Structure formats: structure tokens, C-alpha cells
Amino acid sequence: MKVKKFVAPTLKDATALMKKELGNDAFILSTRVVNKRTDLGIQKHFEITSGIEEELDMVLAEVENRQSPRESSLSDELMKLQKQVIGNQNYRRNKTQDDTIIIAPKSRNRAKINSEQLKEYVDKLIYQEVSKPIIKTVVNQIKKSEEFIDPSNVEDYVITSLSSLIPTTNFEIKKRGKQKIVAIVGPTGVGKTTCIAKLAAISKILNNLKIGIISIDTYRLGAIDQLRIFSEVSNIDMLVAYEPNEMPSLIKKFSDKDLIFIDTAGRGQKNVKELEKTKEFLDIVKLDETYLALSATSSTKHLIDVTKKFDFFNYSALVVTKIDEGVVFGNILNVAVTSKKPLIYLTNGQVIPDDIIAADSDFVAKMVVTGEIS
Ligand SMILES: Nc1nc2c(ncn2[C@@H]2O[C@H](COP(=O)(O)OP(=O)(O)OP(=O)(O)O)[C@@H](O)[C@H]2O)c(=O)[nH]1
Ligand SMILES: [Mg+2]
């Protein structure tokens, strides 16, 4: 930290001098009245001892410089989120009469995070393809809370900071008697059917629920057989709808089920006509929830495009599949933040029903920072 003293006839003038030289991020460590010899004799002046976190500022500036203009709206969104997080932190911000903000940390005696340490994490996040506004948010948070962060524990802080940005939700099933209907939509081959098989098996075996599966995927060769084999092996009822108007009667046939899953045909996000066809099937049914399945192996750009093109399905949450095949994980974080849709499940392999995890923001943040699935 750079520490400097400024002396002026008024506190306001001393603060103005400080800001002129050190910028708006400088803060006042202490003030005192001093006697100063002037042409008019000895006069009372105000002395400000100010500080600025030079090293952290440099890292922040570096990230800011790397940020492309197109990312600014996401940056605004993140700033709002960041305020939420900072609001919880152990900081005192006092407003003085001349509207100068004085940040008064509680103690300045502990070891500090050095810029090398911070750079290490910035580089890790860049490698993980975390979007730059998100990195900027994390650096900002560290900068603002540096006094309270143990330098030996930066990783935990980065994880907590990222975790606070990731929305997640839980799968809830009401008590018996209230049927729930869930559809999974998404691009081709991401693992929609496998995910339904996992959820169906878990709900039946662990929760003892009566499950029905309706497939509307009469498009892909072998799609029906894939589900039929699973339904026979697991003893879960399955029906097929060939036309949208068959849906109500199939739902009626499953009136004794606690939970009905609807498996849809995979559609490329640019195939608007086919997406609309799938929607016709779903519109006839009163769905409780729709999940959008996305593959962890796709790029951030692709994932964001899919979330936008599937928007008209009004999906409530994201299932991220194939995390076991993911090389980097920043894309998961980026898409959750940008789409503002919560993550509900992550799938981590082909084994039914084992390879599925309820989404947890700390777990995802840890994946992003360490590059590993723990
Ligand atoms: N490694 C890995 N493979 C998975 C995972 N989930 C599904 N798969 C595999 O991905 C392939 C496609 O899975 P499906 O469930 O048929 O995908 P889908 O989205 O239903 O495909 P379409 O209906 O054709 O659009 C299969 O080989 C699955 O075993 C996962 O979490 N990890
Ligand atoms: Mg399928």
C-alpha cells in the first residue's frame, strides 16, 4: 500500500489534494490538526494520512483493460450482485460532511495478499474461461475486503466469491396426491433422456414415488427403443405421443403417478420450426417445470445462444450434463450468471442412476477454481 500525507488549510482541501494525486480509490487512514508556518505566521492546517492499494489496483486495471466492450451489460449485472455480497462484509463506510467517503478498516496489522497471489487466481480463472466481468467482480471484492482476508486462504475467498454469483435451486416434490409434471428440453445429444432415466430411477428407488415417462421423441431413430429398454429394466411405465393432441389422454393414463417426466427430441437451437413443433406438444400439458439441458463441453458462446433460443419454452432451471467431459468450467458459471436461470442438476457420467448431482453453488465454484470435480 502506498501511504502519503496531505496538508491543507481545510479538511476538504486536503481531501481534494489526496484525490487529485491518488485517485478516487484512495482512502483516509487518519487525520490530525498540525501547526504550519506560512507567510501569515503559524496557522492551523489539516493533515490527512491516506493510503491506496497499489498492487491490487494494478491487477484490477489489468483485468479491466482485457475486458471487451460487449461484456459491459453483464458487468452491470455483476456489479449489482457484487453490492449484495459486499453488503454482507465486515466493512465500515462513513460519509463525511463534504461527501468524502472514508473507508476505515478495523485493523491494518495483518499480512496482506500480494499481487502475485491475486494474479495466480486471475490467471486460473482466465484459463477456466470465466468471463472477464466475473473476474473483475471477484478482484473488486478481494480489493474491497483485503483487510479481512487471510493471505493463506485466498482460494477459499475466491470460491466463496464465485459461489455467491451462482444461482441454484432444488428439485422439490410435493406430498402424495399432488402430481408433478417435468419436461426436459435442449439441443441434440446433450443427455436429456439419460438425465430423465437417472431422475426417474432415483425418484422410484430412493423416494418410492410412482413414476411415468412420456416420450415425444419420435424423430430420432432408436430414441423410443432407448427409453423402452430402460423402462422395462427399471419397471417404470412409459408412453409415446406421436401428435400433440394425444398428450392429454396420455397424462390421464398416468393419473396415478406422482411424477411424470416428458422426454423431448433434441433440437438444434437454430431449428426454429422444429423447436416450435416440440413446444406444441408441451403447450397442451400443464407443466410444473421445464428444464433446459446443456452440455458442459460446449463453449460459453454456444451455451448462451442456446439459453436465448430456448427461452420461449419458459424453462425454470438448467441441467448441466457431461461435467465429467468438461475441460474447463467457467462456461457453466458464465451461462448461469448471464441467463439468470438457476442450476438444478449436474450430470457426471453415463451410469444410471448414479451419475447425477444436485447443483450446489460451492461445488461449481470449486470446480471452476481448481479445474477438478471433487
Ligand atoms: N460422459 C457423459 N456422457 C453422458 C452423460 N449424460 C449422457 N451421456 C451420454 O451422452 C449420449 C447421449 O445421451 P442421451 O441421453 O441419449 O442424449 P439426448 O439429449 O437425449 O439425445 P437426443 O435425444 O438425441 O437429443 C449417451 O451416450 C449418454 O450415455 C454424462 O453426464 N456424461
Ligand atoms: Mg433423447
Image (cartoon, helix red, strand yellow):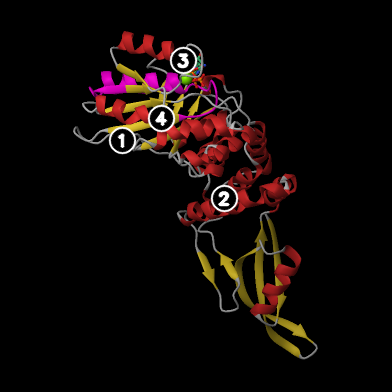
Q: CA distance from mark 2 to mark 1?
A: 28 Å
Q: Residues within 10 Å of mark 1 (few under 14, many from 20)?
A: few
Secondary structure of the residue carrying numbered label 3: helix
Give the mark nearest the N terminus, 3 or 2. Answer: 2
Looking at marks 2 and 4 on the same chain, the residue that comes earlier in the sequence is marked by 2
**Is 215 drawn above or below residue 303 in the view shown?**
above
**Percent from the top left, x then y, of residue 129?**
64, 34
- Cα distance in 3D space between marks 4 and 3: 18 Å
Q: Which residues are magenta?
A: 185-212
Q: Amino acid at mark 4?
A: Pro
- Mark 3 residue type: Ala
The answer to whether residue 241 is left or right of residue 256 is right
Q: Nearer the viewer, mark 2 or mark 1?
A: 1
Q: Quadrant of residue 356?
A: top left
Would residue 266 appear left or right of 287 to someone viewing this image? right
Q: Earlier in the sequence, mark 4 or mark 3?
A: 3
Q: Residues within 10 Å of mark 3 (few under 14, many from 20)?
A: some
**Which image quadrant is residue 273 in?**
top right
First-in-chain label (1 vs 4)? 1
Task: Determine which residue is flagged by label 2.
Answer: 78
Direction bottom: furthest residue: 40
As drawn, the label of residue 240 is none
* Residue 54 appears left or right of 107: right
Is the C-beta of the residue carrying label 3 under 8 Å from the nearest atom of ligand 2?
yes
* Kind of residue at badge 1: Glu
How far separated are the C-alphas under marks 1 and 4?
A: 27 Å
Q: Residues within 10 Å of mark 2 (few under 14, many from 20)?
A: many
Can the viewer see residue 251?
A: yes
* SS for callout 1: loop
Residue that carries the numbered disc 1 in the rendered image: 172
**Residue 223 image label:** 3
